[in-house]
Every structure is written in C-alpha cells, then in structure tokens.
Image (spheres, rainbow, N blue to C red):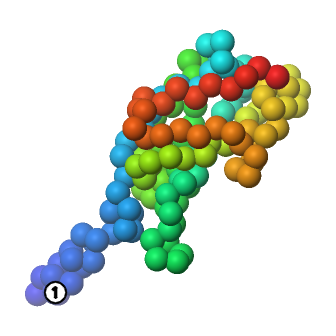
Amino acid sequence: MRFLVFFVLAVPLLAGCGKGGPFDYIPVSGTVTYEDGTLIPASRIELAFTSLAPPIGKKVVPRIGYASVKVSDGTFSGVTSYKFSDGLVPGKHKVTFVVDNPKGKRSDLMAAKYFDVGTTPLIVDTADIPLQIKVPKP
C-alpha cells in the first residue's frame, strides 16, 4: 500500500522534471576548426553556448549549453543545457571557448576575445545544424 501511495504521488512530480523548464531543446552537433579547416592544436576544447533568446517574463532565461570537442577530429555532440545531451534552445547563441594549450598560452591558439561572452564575435544559429564553428588562426 505504501508503494502505491508513493507511486501515485511521485510519478506526476517526475513527469514534469525532464523538460528543462519553459524551454524546448534540440540536439546539436558540429565541428570546430580554424578558418582554413585545420584542427586547433589544443589538448582540450570546451564550448559554451549562451542563448540570445529573450527572457520569459522578466527573469527566466535559458541555461548555457556546454560541449566537449574531440580534439582528434574537431567534432562535438551531446551539447548539454538542462539535462545530459538535451541540446540547445532553438535560435541564436554566442559561442565561447575554454582551451588548454600544452605548448604555451591559450592565446597562442586563438584570440582572447573568444574566451569571454562579452567580447566573442561568434554567433551560431540552431537552424544551421550541424554547426561549423571556425576561428581565425592567431
């Protein structure tokens, strides 16, 4: 009987937990390279996608999406915003990088403006999946 009571009370609560709030998400994948198509010689590349969607109401904004790039081929998938591999809110997003350079400073791999959401010029649109993110060589 306790199990039945738990089940009746818990299942409706769990049903609303997976959506990600008031936003819909779409799976996102793509590649990251220099503009000439060569791979970025980093030991680690992480991407952050900051939605440019307007807030719902006055305060509800989409979460930032994150992805790890396979440095061996420049591909990424499994972008995570709300729950693992859910993707991004449809629309445009600013892209920033976290990179590790085994041979020196991270600014040796790309300009510092790509590390901050306030200065990055990179904007992608989920309408263009798979995304092709290209940065100039420093």
Q: What's under tag 1, amino acid-wise?
A: Val
Residue 114: x, y in percent?
Answer: 73, 39
Residue at 79% from the left image edge and 40% from the top image edge: 113
Q: How many marks?
A: 1
Judged left or right of residue 127, residue 39 is right
Q: Is residue 84 visible?
A: no
Image quadrant assignment for residue 135: top right
Q: Residues within 10 Å of mark 1 (few under 14, many from 20)?
A: few
Image quadrant assignment for residue 129: top left
Judged left or right of residue 47, residue 14 is left
Q: Which residue is mark 1?
A: 5
Of 115 and 74, the residue lying toward us: 115
Of 107 and 113, the residue lying toward us: 113
Image quadrant assignment for residue 41: top right
Judged left or right of residue 67, residue 126 is left
Residue at 68% from the left image edge and 32% from the top image edge: 44
